[in-house]
Image: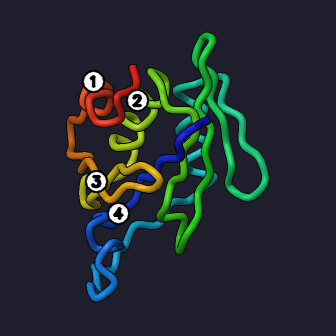
């Protein structure tokens, strides 16, 4: 069974606390720009309707989609080595003006994706290599 992960500009701790007003994020992801940037890195990149996509790495694949206001939430499937690489790339793709957090479905524990985060940092958090 695959675990679903999320990359958001929102600290998952704020979502856990129903009384927290949280912080309004200004992140807006243009799917066409994202697709163009991903295609320039991975020739195997494919996009689908409803802001969904997949990338193949050798015998591994990462797939995901965007949701939420202005595509602020990146939903990812199939964690593993390729997943870790993709998340590290996504942190570089999104301007450092925006905070990003990675967390798994059913967990409020998150990893802040700071500038310079590596696939090894992500692997330590997810437990997937």
Instruction: Give the Cα separation between the discs numbered 4 and 1.
Output: 21 Å
Instruction: Give the Cα separation between the discs numbered 3 and 1.
Output: 18 Å
In terms of secondary structure, where does tag 3 sit? loop
Q: Return the disc, 1 or 2, that comes first in the chain's sequence.
A: 2
Q: Return the disc, 4 or 3, that comes first in the chain's sequence.
A: 4
- State which quadrant residue 60 falls in: top right
CA neighbours of label 3 inside 10 A, class few (<14), some (14 to 19), many (20+): some
Instruction: Give the Cα separation between the discs numbered 1 and 2.
Output: 7 Å
- State which quadrant residue 15 falls in: bottom left
Q: Return the disc, 4 or 2, that comes first in the chain's sequence.
A: 4
Cβ atoms under marks 3 and 2 closer than 8 Å: no
Residue positioned 61% across, 32% down in the render: 39
Residue 82 is situated, as x and y percent measured from the top left of the image, at 49, 24
Quadrant for the N terminus in the image: top right
Mark 3 against mark 1, which lies toward the viewer? Answer: 3
Residue 9 is labelled as 4
The residue lying toward the viewer, choosing from 96 and 63, is: 63
Q: How is the image coloured?
A: rainbow
Which residue is under mark 2?
84
Q: Return the disc, 4 or 1, that comes first in the chain's sequence.
A: 4
The residue lying toward the viewer, choosing from 94 and 7, is: 7
Which residue is under mark 1?
120
Cβ atoms under marks 1 and 2 closer than 8 Å: yes
């Amino acid at each position: 069974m695959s675990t679903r992960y999320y990359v958001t500009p929102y600290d998952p701790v704020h979502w856990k606390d129903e009384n927290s007003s949280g912080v309004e994020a200004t992140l807006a992801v243009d799917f066409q720009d994202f697709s163009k940037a991903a295609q320039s890195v991975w020739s195997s990149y494919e996009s689908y309707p409803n802001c969904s996509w997949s990338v193949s790495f050798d015998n591994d694949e990462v797939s995901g989609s965007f949701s939420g206001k202005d595509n602020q939430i990146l939903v990812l499937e199939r964690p593993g080595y390729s997943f870790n690489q993709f998340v590290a790339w996504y942190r570089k793709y999104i301007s450092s003006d925006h905070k990003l957090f990675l967390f798994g479905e059913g967990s409020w524990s998150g990893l802040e994706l700071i500038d310079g985060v590596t696939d090894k940092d992500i692997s330590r958090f997810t437990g997937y290599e």
